[in-house]
Image (cartoon, coloured by chain):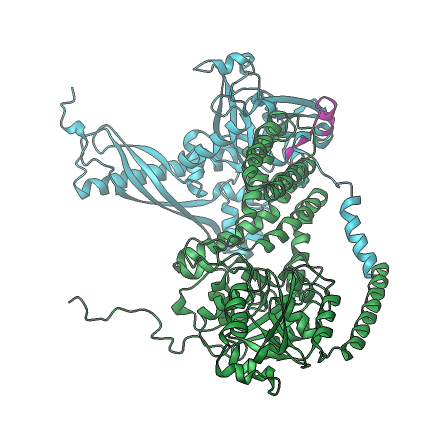
Chain colours: A green, B cyan
Amino acid sequence: MGFFRKKSNSKMHSNSISTSQMMKTNLANELKTNLQENLQRIRDSLGKSSDIIIREIRVGKEETIKAGIIYTDGLTDTISLQNFILETLMLDVEGTELQKKLSPEQNLISILKDFAMTVGEIRELTNFEELLTGLLSGDTIILIDGYAQGLIISNRHWVERGVTEASAQVVVRGPREGFSENLRVNTALVRRRLKDPDLWMESKIIGKRTKTNVAMMYIKGIANDKIVKEVRLRLDKIDIDGILESGNIEELIQDAPYSPFPTIFNTERPDVVAAALLEGRIAILVDGTPFVLVVPALFVQFFQSSEDYYQRADIASLIRLLRFFAFSIAMLAPALFIAVTTFNHAMLPTGLLISLAAQREGAPFPAFVEAIIMEVTFEILREAGLRMPRTIGSAISIVGAFVIGTAAVEAGIISAAMVIVVSITAISSFVSPTYNLAISGRMLRFGFMALAASFGLLGITIGLIALLLHLCSLRSFGVPYMSSIAPFNLSDQKDTFILLPIWKMFTRPRLISQQNIVRQQDSASAKPQPPKNEGG
Amino acid sequence: MKKCMIVLLILSPILTGCWDKRELNELGITLAIGIDKVEDEYQVTAQVVVPSEIPTKTSTGRSPVILFQEKGETVNEALRKITKTSPRKIYPGHLRMLVLGEDLAKEGIAKSLDLLSRDWELRSDFFVAIAKDMTAAEVLNVRTTIENIPANNMFNSLQTSEHYWAATNGIKLDELIASLTSDGTEAVLTGILVTGDQEIGSTKQEVESINPPVRIVYDELAVFKKDKLVGWLTERESRGYNGIVNEVQKSVTAISCPEEGKATIEIIQADSKVKGKINKGMPEVDINIKVKGNVGEVECQINLNDLDTIVELEKITEKQMEETINMSIETLQKQYKSDIFGFGEAIHRSNPKEWKKMKEQWDEEFPKLKANVKVDVKLVHTGTEGNSFLEKIEVK
């Protein structure tokens, strides 16, 4: 551990040097009045990159004014650049009032900004740093000779994946659209569901080199101010060169970095984010990824699918119980099998014991080794199926099923019962609506198997107690991870193991939104009732 | 410090060497154990399952069980000696049947049971039976067909019979030990025996025949005094015993019709209450039995549509049951002088002070005890028929 700490210390040291160097250069960061000097500086600092287009033009009365237009090819909407900027400046201006105004005597920058540019978002810039950030984000920069100012025009446009169906969190009933890679599109998707003026958004730029846009969304008045402040604080503390996916942010701001359990929820479904915001949670959207982070995250939240709330409550409750059950199978089934077949034989019914013993006749490996072989094989197959190109993926599963299922048993390497146990474990691990909790179960499974192989049921029990203690010690942004179970809250039980109909849920989860609890004011009239004298 | 703890925790599962792990194919799964007394030594017979013969789709015809037999000064010693012949250590955790030889039972069974109740591997939910007129080893040496493991055959047969037939009573080890240690109750055990030519019983011939020449049969109850076998009840006495101790779940009983012929009453529920009391210094017990039954079979000319007939049938049944019960009490009082009904316990419960005085002389008091038996029968159904169709055909 000490070794790592030392290393990270030295890293931090070098980082601080580079920031101080940057501070020094900041002083000379103002734009110059000379256009050529400015353009040369852009060329120098970008290393003459071929996708940076620098166009010099002459505009205005008798074409006396020298101007430069700079943009990044591929990130800028070239059509709007031609139609609304180049054409306005070079052709349409001929013989109009504007041309007279465009004389060196006037303040050209403000005239251009106020009269000439037929584009939506435009602002002035004076700073070289800002220029480069805008340029590399896809904005168009206009610099004019003789002014230490410039214009930054937002006409970003690049090829991207549109809004498509969420592929990682599939539902039968419910909205199909999922987030895309574009932050603006994503915030729009949320905004479209919550037309509430209290839905506030704070933007941040994180990553010294990637300069990734990160947006923090919450509903003012529902979200707990303390948690909002805490999220802001943790985001501001991030000091890293690059953020490529929300997973990077998640790792940098999570509460328990060594815990196998996720303390930050992620989703690619706008309706899930909207529902979370309504419960008083805070969403963190990161540019470049469809996965949005939601905090604070509770243990039970990972068993809740958005579809639960769109279906009837009865079936949703049963399915949710099934998920909890499947999670315990995915975590414990092989361990329990090892324990009862190698230590606690008395736990089995006599008939089953004899039948299992018959299957184990001639099996060369102990049950634990058998289980490890099968589990590892399965994990390899799963990984291979994920990473292979889609078209070959199905071939993998066929070979896998054949190898695991029949050949291993027929060859007498593995007992048939073990194949059943591993299969049910594998299937159960796919039930979880959230991928990252299923992963925790998958990892813990091996720990439990080792405990079972050395101590039997006793080991499993001790492992479970330790696990429970660990879960109860976790916090997600100040909220107890197991909350509504521990600390117990009766009204939150309406949405924990079972789900009550939506007209029974009057309140938000207690510990998340502490200031604005009530969802439906009139609890009596919430229940749907047909008029009494109808149909008579 | 914390790091040390973590390292220790991680190492502990790895370094334990799997403690007392035993794979399934290292177990000699023993489903039945027989204990006999042979020349001052215990002879222990273990019926061990041969797993490879169990679930095969095609029957090999080989025996699904194997017997191991050893003698020793104690039961435990004999059991351990079996490892001399068996490749796997006896695993008695799933024991279904414990068969005790009659010779052993006559000498006293208590000493041989200690190991079985002490060993942590054993559950106490197996049946105990006495081999009638033979050794336990002989009982275990018979192959069976429907349940191809003989121990399972014995277990299931006793369980079914106990449920549907009032004369058998499956006694499990914990019940046996409870009645052995109790002051006011003596033990009973069910008898088991083998009919037919025992030479054939263990051979392939036995399971190939549609009418196996050798059968395992449950017999009536064995009466104990302390831990020694003193005699056997008849079938009728066994029924009486089970009626008193509330062990009848379902049964049928044949009665005589008011005029001639027979009828059968199917007992669907029986509830017995035994109350002890002291009457003028003498112990007395009231036995109240409430029985619910159906008319199960009618082989005589009676009008079931008439409520009086039903009442009459109830009376006949009551009388017959009372007789049965009185008879079994009498046999126990006169012949065996053994209080297997737990009358002493009933008096202990109702009058602990008096019981303390007569506890020592209970053996003398019990034969003089007065038992007031009252059976109350309610017939609730007559089945899917009203009157018997026998009415409509002329009985020649």
For the C terminus of chain A, the quadrant is bottom left
Return the residue nearer the eye: B241 or B367. B241
A25 left or right, relative to A264: right
A210 lies above or below A418? below
Magenta region, residue range:
B80-92
Number of marks in picture = 0
Return the residue nearer the eye: A411 or B312. A411
For the N terminus of chain A, the quadrant is bottom right
Can residue B97 be seen at all in this image of the molecule? no
Residue A493 point in image, percent of width and height: 49, 66
Residue located at (48% from left, 27% from top): B218
Return the residue nearer the eye: B258 or A41. A41
Residue B106 point in image, percent of width and height: 60, 29
A27 lies above or below B61? below
Which residue appears farthest toward the front when viewing the image?
Answer: A62
Residue located at (51% from left, 14% from top): B206
